[in-house]
Amino acid sequence: MSVQKTGDWAAARRILRAGPIRFKAAVGTALRQEAQLLRNEIVQGLTKQAPGGEALAPPSPLTLAAREMKGRGGTKSLLVSGDLRNSVAAIVKGDEAFIGVPRKARAQGGKALVDVAQVQEFGKGPIVVPMTPAMRRFLFALLRHAGQQPTGGSGRGVVILNIPARPFLRPAFKKFSQGAQTRFLARVAALSGLGGL
């Protein structure tokens, strides 16, 4: 009976000599680096209006008119104040990483940004909103400001809203996952001093 060795035994010896403590530290550092890289991909995607390379739908004329009437400018989707973009975090605990909008993230006015992120990511509607006289006046002023002719409506005293999905996390995750395993293993190898693998 004979034994035949196959594979890169020199690389195997280097891995075994690296030691479990050094290897564990390398895995932790590589995980933090990858998490930060994904966070940057999401933030840059919002800034460039194309998370993961998929263009965000522009705001509707009514949304732009409402921003202008409230004294806010800007024509970009999801970037009126920057709160949502700035709330994207990379949190690493042990061997797990969370990249997204944490539940505790709040806008300047105190609104939970995780709710805003969920509505933007998946859309929402139909939402039935009962109309008050003040809301009706504002809506008609908004329509005129947007260059649309107000109509009397159905007379039922409600407005039905549909918020379209503007995914900014899923496209970035999808793009980032391409080559993630190879990238991560290369980081671990380099950080362990095994760059030749």
Image (cartoon, grey):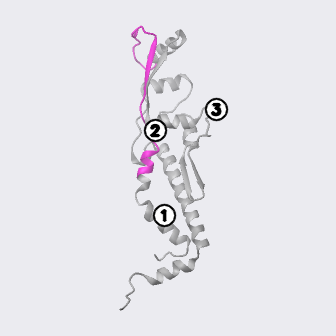
Q: Position of residue 81 (x, y in %)?
A: 57, 35
Pointer 3: what residue? Answer: 110
- Is the magenta region chiefly helix, strand or loop? loop
Do the numbered discs 3 and 2 sit on residues whose CB atoms are within 8 Å?
no
Q: Which kind of residue does numbered mark 2 sit on?
A: Glu
Which dot marks residue 121? Answer: 2
Q: Quadrant of the N terminus?
A: bottom left
Give the residues in magenta: 145-174
Name the one closer to the observer, 124 or 5.
5
Q: Secondary structure at mark 2?
A: helix
Q: Residues within 10 Å of mark 3 (few under 14, many from 20)?
A: few
On the picture, is 134 further left or further right than 154? Answer: right
Mark with earlier residue (2, 1): 2
On the picture, is 134 further left or further right than 144? Answer: right
Mark with earlier residue (3, 1): 3
Q: Which kind of residue does numbered mark 3 sit on?
A: Gly
Residue drawn at the location 39% of the way across and 14% of the way down = 149
Pointer 1: what residue? Answer: 184
Using the rendered image of the protein, determine whether residue 82 is visible from the camera's viewpoint: no
Residue drawn at the location 61% of the way across and 71% of the way down = 21
The residues bearing labels 3 and 1 have C-alpha atoms spaced at a distance of: 37 Å
Residue 164 among those drawn in magenta: yes
Q: Secondary structure at mark 3?
A: loop
Mark with earlier residue (3, 2): 3
Q: Position of residue 196 (x, y in %)?
A: 47, 77
The residues bearing labels 2 and 1 have C-alpha atoms spaced at a distance of: 27 Å
The residues bearing labels 3 and 2 have C-alpha atoms spaced at a distance of: 20 Å
Do the numbered discs 2 and 1 sit on residues whose CB atoms are within 8 Å?
no
Q: Which kind of residue does numbered mark 1 sit on?
A: Phe
Residue drawn at the location 53% of the way across and 30% of the way down = 73
Q: Position of residue 100 (x, y in %)?
A: 53, 46
